[in-house]
Image (cartoon, grey):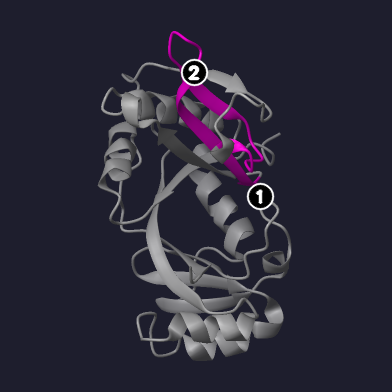
Amino acid sequence: MADEYPAVEQRLGRHLTEWVGQWPPLADGITVVGDPARLQPTWDGSIRKLLGVGNGTATIIAVPPPQADAVAAALSDGPDRAGLGDELGAILGTGPARFGAGVFRSTTDVDPTIEALGEWVTTQTSNLPPWLAPFNGPRLVARNNAGEVIASVGIKIHDRFGYEISVVTEAEARGRGFARRLVATAARWVLDDGAIPTYLHQPSNLASAHVAEAVGFADNGWTVHGLWPRS
């Protein structure tokens, strides 16, 4: 039981070891890890050949083992040079791409003053927002008096120890605290299930950052790294 449900302070490390193949980093800077999991389907069934997490001083980038040396060479001049995404896309066979970073947050301490909200739904149904369809975890929804979903959370179960929370509030319901209450409710559920709740967002998404901070997902300077196809 102790192995299945590790102490709360151990869960992030267990999750990241599963998610990016190695944790903690053994040296500052960027370390590229060959991880067979980068060739396996992820939470929504897609394969993400590059995934990284940084803690402010060190970053682990996980890629399929056959491409690890080539990716390490491409990143040897740093992560910000022009054309890097396209070069990595060519190495990994994903086509022209953009290499970027988002904000990575986790918490073990949800604000206890935030009231619970929402109805749990285990599978996608026709009356739920389509954006929730790909999620492999439960959905948490808030409805108006007419029964329409006005705010919702999807949970991505990355592995046994790490569940990521995503939230969307419909335009007419924004600014009323629904997202904050749903995220807090979902984060408590994740902790009760023996995992660590994580919350990722773009640095420019100030509304999402505000929700995260209010719930207890502090910004500790951690980052998430990925490779996205050019639109």
Q: Is residue 195 visible?
A: no
Q: Residue at x 54, y 32 (%)?
A: 129
Task: Report the amino acid beneath label 1.
Answer: Asp
Which element carries disc 1, helix, strand or loop? loop
Image vertical order of residue 23 relative to residue 213, above or below: below
Q: Is residue 115 visible?
A: yes
Q: Residue at x 42, y 86 (%)?
A: 83
Which element carries disc 2, helix, strand or loop? loop
Q: Dot 2 corresponds to which residue?
A: 148
Counting from the top left corner in percent of width and height, residue 49 is at 63, 70
- Within-10-Å neighbours for mark 1: few <14, some 14–19, many 20+: some
**Quadrant in the rendering for residue 67:** bottom right
Looking at the image, which is closer to me, 11 or 74?
A: 74
Counting from the top left corner in percent of width and height, residue 22 is at 59, 66
Q: Tell which tag, 2 or 1, sits nearer the viewer.
A: 2
Image vertical order of residue 51 relative to residue 71, above or below: above
**Quadrant in the rendering for residue 157:** top right
Q: Earlier in the sequence, mark 2 or mark 1?
A: 1
Q: Residue at x 50, y 64 (%)?
A: 24
Counting from the top left corner in percent of width and height, residue 7 is at 55, 38
Q: Dot 1 corresponds to which residue?
A: 44
Task: Report the amino acid beneath label 2.
Answer: Glu
Looking at the image, which is closer to me, 79 or 112?
A: 79
Quadrant location, the N terminus? top right
Q: Which residues are magenta?
A: 132-159
